[in-house]
Amino acid sequence: MSVNANVEAARATGASEFWAGARACVPVLVAVLPFGLLFGALAVDNGFTVAEAVLMSATVYGGASQMVGIELFGQKIAPWLIVVSIFAVNFRHVLYSAAFGRRIGHWSGLQQALGFFLLSDPQFAETERKAEDGRRLSFAWYIGFGAPVWLAWVVETAIGGYFGGLISDPHAIGLDFLLPIYFLGLVMGFRKRPFWLPVVLASAVASMLAYKFVGSPWHVSIGAVAGILLAAVAAPVDGEKRKA
Amino acid sequence: MSTTVWIVLAGAVVTYLTRVGGHLVLSRFERIHPRVEAGLNAVPAAVLTTLVAPAVLSAGPSELIALAVAGIVALRGGMMSMFLSGAAVLIALRYFIG
């Protein structure tokens, strides 16, 4: 095979990987749609301009933290405290980052920098699932998945900001509870992993206790640490399984 | 620039730090201990659980039934069917029982 043919083949693989990623992100696009619109509407309602809401979606790109941010902004909380709260809600990404970083050693520095920027909840969950089949994670697939989600999030924020007043009864269409249902789906997607049920139970109990006694948003970090520590201490690892 | 823009940009910077930070810290270690590996494998389920569980505390019957139905559908179907069935059950129950 000539060098040219190799380049051609690589390009074709890249394109098909990109489109495979784009197909995989469709459920996420649908699931995220109401939240993008909702964020835009709530942001304007809390005193953001549409442009500021769009800037936040484009640069922070983390739904839950953006919701917390505009909520506190509406309550006239000190700016540094709002930033700290955004950091606290997003702190879980440290854990995604550590797990995801192992998979992209073969990417260029710029690709890695962009990859980390797009590392949202669904992006991480789908990437882990994709990597589970043992093949190398391609940058083309990752961007095919992440770019449409990012673009949709930004555009929905703008639309929600302009037309937010039109949703007369968000409760009736279940807007406030779609996010937990969506996250439950992601949790269920990992049920084949070893030690899944103990981790989920530990994190569930710890996060509920923290929610009651420490308060939001710390329940996320505390609950996550409980499940992860349990797995680190008690999950069977390969070496021990062979001995048993 | 307005205070709002500064808040947004500072929020963006700290968010990026969380997304790149875990890797930068971890990549300093040459070999990953199997116990650390076991912990990392638990990360997605552990974190995502904390985004669901507290919502259960404040949920009424409509929300709980919708979550249960979505969870059962997830055992068989894909992400989309579980999400749509959960949302449909939620909207229907809220319409009938509030």
Image (cartoon, helix red, strand yellow):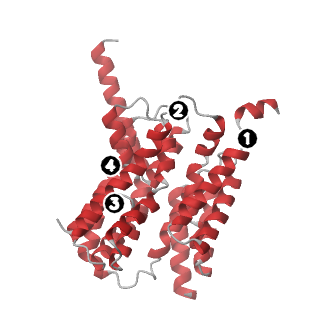
Marked residue chain, label 1: A
Q: Amino acid at mark 3?
A: Gly
Judging from the image, what secondary structure is the residue with disc 4 in? helix
Dot 4 surroundings within 10 Å: few (below 14), some, or many (20 or more)? some
> Residues under labels 4 and 1: Cα distance?
37 Å
Question: Which part of the image, by quadrant, shows the C terminus of chain A?
Answer: top right
- Please give the label number shown on residue B76: none
Residue B24 visible in the current orientation: yes
Q: Quadrant of residue A112?
A: top left
Depth check, front residue: B87 or A122: A122
For disc 3, the marked residue is: B11
Depth check, front residue: A144 or A193: A193
Q: Quadrant of residue A7?
A: top left
Q: Amino acid at mark 4?
A: Ala
Q: Are discs 1 and 3 located on one and the same chain? A: no
For disc 2, the marked residue is: B29
Q: Amino acid at mark 2?
A: Phe
Mark positioned earlier in the residue sequence (2 or 3): 3
Q: Is residue A161 left or right of residue B25?
A: left
For disc 4, the marked residue is: A147
Depth check, front residue: A186 or B78: A186
Dot 3 surroundings within 10 Å: few (below 14), some, or many (20 or more)? many
Dot 1 surroundings within 10 Å: few (below 14), some, or many (20 or more)? some
- Please give the label number shown on residue A236: 1
Q: Amino acid at mark 1?
A: Pro
